Image (cartoon, rainbow, N blue to C red):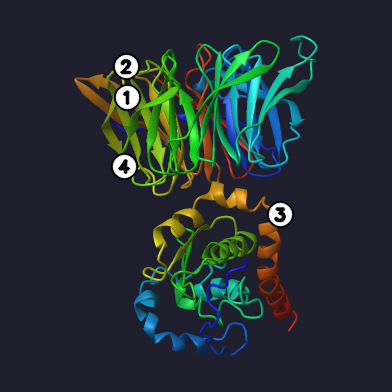
Amino acid sequence: MNEIYNPNPTILKTAGKRGTRASSGLWDLDEGLAGGCGLCDDHSVSESIDQNEVFDLVRFITDPEHKHMTLEELMVVSAPQCSVSNETNRVLIEFTPTVPHCGMSTVIGLTLRVRLLRALPNRFKVDIRVKPGSHQSENELNKQLNDKERVAAALENPALLIVLEECLESAQNRVRGHAHQ
Amino acid sequence: MSLVSELPVHRSASQTGHQDRAWAIAWNPTKPLLASCSADKTVRLYNYRITPPSSEDEPSSYGEGLKFELNTSIATGHAKTVRALAWSPSGNTLATGSFDSNVGIWQQVGGEDEEGAWECVSSLEGHETECKGVAYSASGTLLASCSRDKSVWVWEVLPDADFECMGVLMEHSQDVKSVAWHPREEILASCSYDDTIRIWIDDPQDDWDCVAILRGHTSTVWSISFSPDGDYIASGSDDRTVRIWKRVTQYKWDCVQVLEGYHDRTIFSVAWGEGKLGSLGWIASASSDGQIIVYQVNVKGGIEVRVLTKAMSAHDVYDVNCIAWCPRKGLENYLASCGDDGSVRVWKVQVGK
């Protein structure tokens, strides 16, 4: 935690509100990925979820390095980077590390996984990856983030758990806050 | 020829109990006892008895069944998840491997009557990080353990719950996920996050030596199991395939079969049992996709594998973490499984009629 991997991250100005579809207009660059999200089931049964709901769960997670900024503001996650299949019960998040050598990517990936583990129905199998080409150790990161034994062991590490809970606090509070509006 | 559907796999017992993910199960080789371990840091022991056909517990068409009840729940004292289990061949000792990096050795104190409590008689410290696998050799004189620290340790089992480290095998380049012994010889296999399987023997002149590296899987190898005759190894991987390796010379193993297209998520466990049919018995594979698949293996010139039966959502929506065939005579068609739901289930593969 002593080394700063990205002292000057690019920041997205967010609308600051939950559930805003307007933000998806900012993501023209990601059209390819958004198109790949044809998995989403429109004629859904009552319990089905969509990519915006998944995004809403993770957007306010704060960055482990820039603790006052959210993953949405840092453009680490966006709605098109969250894909859902209600038929096969799969959720995939492809996040973008702020810099290709970001040493915090494992922690960010873990926060995404833990958030979804806690918030999504049990029927969903979750895969967390970095967006192709966005990190120099892409394969190693993907392998680690999807090895459930390593994830389970990481979550029994008290020091790491403190960092994760700090990052997750804001996401959990803001969703709760919204529920009272 | 026909692919038998779910029907012949009959869930004869279901035990919910663990408070958290159940990682492993192990049948006692000599007594009617089944052990399971969990992230909740406990080990649970279940007794079972054979129930006659057409008793009220068991539809008559399924023949005899097994009835389970909880014997005891052991609060292991491990500081973290209990990841792995192994019974000694005598059935008197249980080894536990934990994320706290230690291996626990458990025996029933106060004789072998049913009342004796299970106590930790020894704790093997050596691994630097999570222990992920434990296994006793066929003779019961050696115990192997493996860890995220990339090492495999071989321990000699001495009298009075004493253990001596015989070797620290350091050749894997990543976490060692599991270890398994040959059913007769002192040959050890280990599999790893480095995508390989390694074969080890005790060099009389030297230390334990890696005599073969089995390459072919394209991702983490989670589980390995020797065939009952010892001439083959089955391996299950994150690459979603099961591979079958044949011993072609003393220390050379070749991949002779790749079973792909059956699972669509990580395969966490493979188990090769005697089965009731097939010249080489039955392989079972279990996966994050929720399926348990049973394959029958025959040798006719080459090796011939076909799906005998499967259970689709074996632990409902949850991952299946471990499967194990009952090693006891006459019960070779019983398979135990455990999953992320914390439950342990026992399946009977129906044959004939």
Mark 1 residue element: strand
Query: What residue would you read off at disc 4?
Result: B260
Instruction: Select label 2 or label 3 by which is in front.
Output: 3
Q: CA distance from mark 2 to mark 3?
A: 50 Å
Task: Tell me the amino acid under the disc marked 4.
Answer: Glu
Q: CA distance from mark 1 to mark 2?
A: 7 Å
Residue A3 position, x and y percent, is 58, 69
x 60%, y 73%: residue? A63
Query: What residue would you read off at disc 1?
Result: B297
Instruction: Select label 3 or label 1 by which is in front.
Output: 3
Q: Is residue A81 above or below residue B351?
A: below
Query: What residue would you read off at disc 2?
Result: B279
Query: What residue would you read off at disc 3?
Result: A158
Q: Are the residues under badges 4 and 1 in a single subunit?
A: yes
Mark 3 residue element: helix
Task: Tell me the amino acid under the disc marked 3.
Answer: Pro
Q: Quadrant of the C terminus of chain B?
A: top left
Q: CA distance from mark 2 to mark 4?
A: 22 Å
Residue B12 position, x and y percent, is 57, 28
Residues A39 and B189: in front is B189
Q: CA distance from mark 4 to mark 1?
A: 15 Å
